Image (spheres, rainbow, N blue to C red):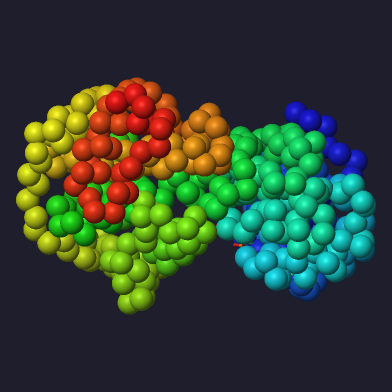
């Protein structure tokens, strides 16, 4: 492990993410200065982190000495002047370019000139944050996942003008904090929030096509794909509103590609405030009894032309040892190939290389395999063949494949 720097880390914004990141840093030997809009918010965050650290010790994850030392490393900052010794600042304030710019303009004059500025933003451009505060070379993306102490992945994002030495240093720090790093370029949704979108979107489309209900689709993805949760139960857990907002943001920023077009059924659920578990009603009804579907599909029978049937069978045989009924196989194949296709487009668009995409997806959303490892097992040819067959059945060209999946058909 890299030795903790003698300089503290400054965390600005001590809500859900900032507090989680502070906990990670402190339990890995780094002194942390915490700053928020007022002293009371910081005090509450420190109390909360102390509670989490106490629980880690109770569970045997920290010794008593480690517990006490970790807690002693957390220091409230009274103002930006208290961050003057930090060599890394991580901001986790509200998701607004204006708010982040205004905050940094206030804080920057107090920082060491060599301090790295990291942003935990999910949806803003790292380059845009850097340009707006006049020092793009110092700004790096450090995208944690919620809850930060438990989720192993950090996406480290290079803005167009980020200094690569600073990016490398951020990678080392994240690794010293026990995290797995995926490196990505500064593109909408980075890796995970882009490549995981079809898991939800293609599932919604199958539902909208009328082939299967939410429970049948969820079960197909669990049993054939080995996914921990199906797309509908997962979006009910995340919150349909949060999930739709991420889709809309990534879709718009990427220029509205048909592949990532939001589902109107899901948008309708959100408009009706059927947000998932938190409102008791989403894709399922959650009323204390076993969840049961709250929405019902049309009843369209699956009749596949021979070419499509062959392509689905070949794809599924390569993708899983599990045996499924034709409808289940079709569901699983359609969702998985959409993820693989998005992953291939992301690589083609220069978001990251294949290895970093696989790492991000396995560690960030816990899929049983990375999309490229899966495509390798299935065979790129079989993937290309299925994409071609599917693309012939849609009018929006959304299964169009990039060269990686096309050239080998
Ligand atoms: P949150 O609402 O829990 O916390 C934000 C904190 O920032 C609050 O304590 C607020 O008082 C403080 N704050 C707001 N304006 C400030 C300012 N000008 N100066 C200092 N502090 C200020 O938000 P959350 O969920 O922790 O998100 C923070 C950032 O992390 C956002 O950029 C978000 O997109 C990103 N993010 C969130 C994830 C999540 O699952 N919640 C996951 C990954 C990234």
Q: Residue at x 12, y 61 (%)?
A: 298
Residue 249 in the image, given as x and y percentages of width and height: 50, 62
Ligand 1 resides in the quarter of the picture at bottom right
Quadrant for the N terminus, please: top right
Left or right, 331 with respect to 135, comes to: left
Left or right, 229 with respect to 211, comes to: right
Q: Residue at x 44, y 32 (%)?
A: 370
The reply to whether residue 346 is in sight is yes
The answer to whether residue 132 is above or below residue 220 is below
Residue 184 picture quarter: top right
Left or right, 119 with respect to 144, comes to: right
Image label count: 0
Left or right, 338 with respect to 209, comes to: right
Residue 365 in the image, given as x and y percentages of width and height: 46, 43
Quadrant for the C terminus, please: top left
Judging depth in this view, the residue of 34 and 192 nearest the camera is 192
Residue 278 in the image, given as x and y percentages of width and height: 41, 68
Q: Residue furthest bottom?
A: 272
The answer to whether residue 60 is above or below residue 188 is above
The reply to whether residue 117 is in sight is no
Residue 169 in the image, given as x and y percentages of width and height: 78, 37
Q: Residue at x 78, y 68 (%)?
A: 103
């Amino acid at each position: 492990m890299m030795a903790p720097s003698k300089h503290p880390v400054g965390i600005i914004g001590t809500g859900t993410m900032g507090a989680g990141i502070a906990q990670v840093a402190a339990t890995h030997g780094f002194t942390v200065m915490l700053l928020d809009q007022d002293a009371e918010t910081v005090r509450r965050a420190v109390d909360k982190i102390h509670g989490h650290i106490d629980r880690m010790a109770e569970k045997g994850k920290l010794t008593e000495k480690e517990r006490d030392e970790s807690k002693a490393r957390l220091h409230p900052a009274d103002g930006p002047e208290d961050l003057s010794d930090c060599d890394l600042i991580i901001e986790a304030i509200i998701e607004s370019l204006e708010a982040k710019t205004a905050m940094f303009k206030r804080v920057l004059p107090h920082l060491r000139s060599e301090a790295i500025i990291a942003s935990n933003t999910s949806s803003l451009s790292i380059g845009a944050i850097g340009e707006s505060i006049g020092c793009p070379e110092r700004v790096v993306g450090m995208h944690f996942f919620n809850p930060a102490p438990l989720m192993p992945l950090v996406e480290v994002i290079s803005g167009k003008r980020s200094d690569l030495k600073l990016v490398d240093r951020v990678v080392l720090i994240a690794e010293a904090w026990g995290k797995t790093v995926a490196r990505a370029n500064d593109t909408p949704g980075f890796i995970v929030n882009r490549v995981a979108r079809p898991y939800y979107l293609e599932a919604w489309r199958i539902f909208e096509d009328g082939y299967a209900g939410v429970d049948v689709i969820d079960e197909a993805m669990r049993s054939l794909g080995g996914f921990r949760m199906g797309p509908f139960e997962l979006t009910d857990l995340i919150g349909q509103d949060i999930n739709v907002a991420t889709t809309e943001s990534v879709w718009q920023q990427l220029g509205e590609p048909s592949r990532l077009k939001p589902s109107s059924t899901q948008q309708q659920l959100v408009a009706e405030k059927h947000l998932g578990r938190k409102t008791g009603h989403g894709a399922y009804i959650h009323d204390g009894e076993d969840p049961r579907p709250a929405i019902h599909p049309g009843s369209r029978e699956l009749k596949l032309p021979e070419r499509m049937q062959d392509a689905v069978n070949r794809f599924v045989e390569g993708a899983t040892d599990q045996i499924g009924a034709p409808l289940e196989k079709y569901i699983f194949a359609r969702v998985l190939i959409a993820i693989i296709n998005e992953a291939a487009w992301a690589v083609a668009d220069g978001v990251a290389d294949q290895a970093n995409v696989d790492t991000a997806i396995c560690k960030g959303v816990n899929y049983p395999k990375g999309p490229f490892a899966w495509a390798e097992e299935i065979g790129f040819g079989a993937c290309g063949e299925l994409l071609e067959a599917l693309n012939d059945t849609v009018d929006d060209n959304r299964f169009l494949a990039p060269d990686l999946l096309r050239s080998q058909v």
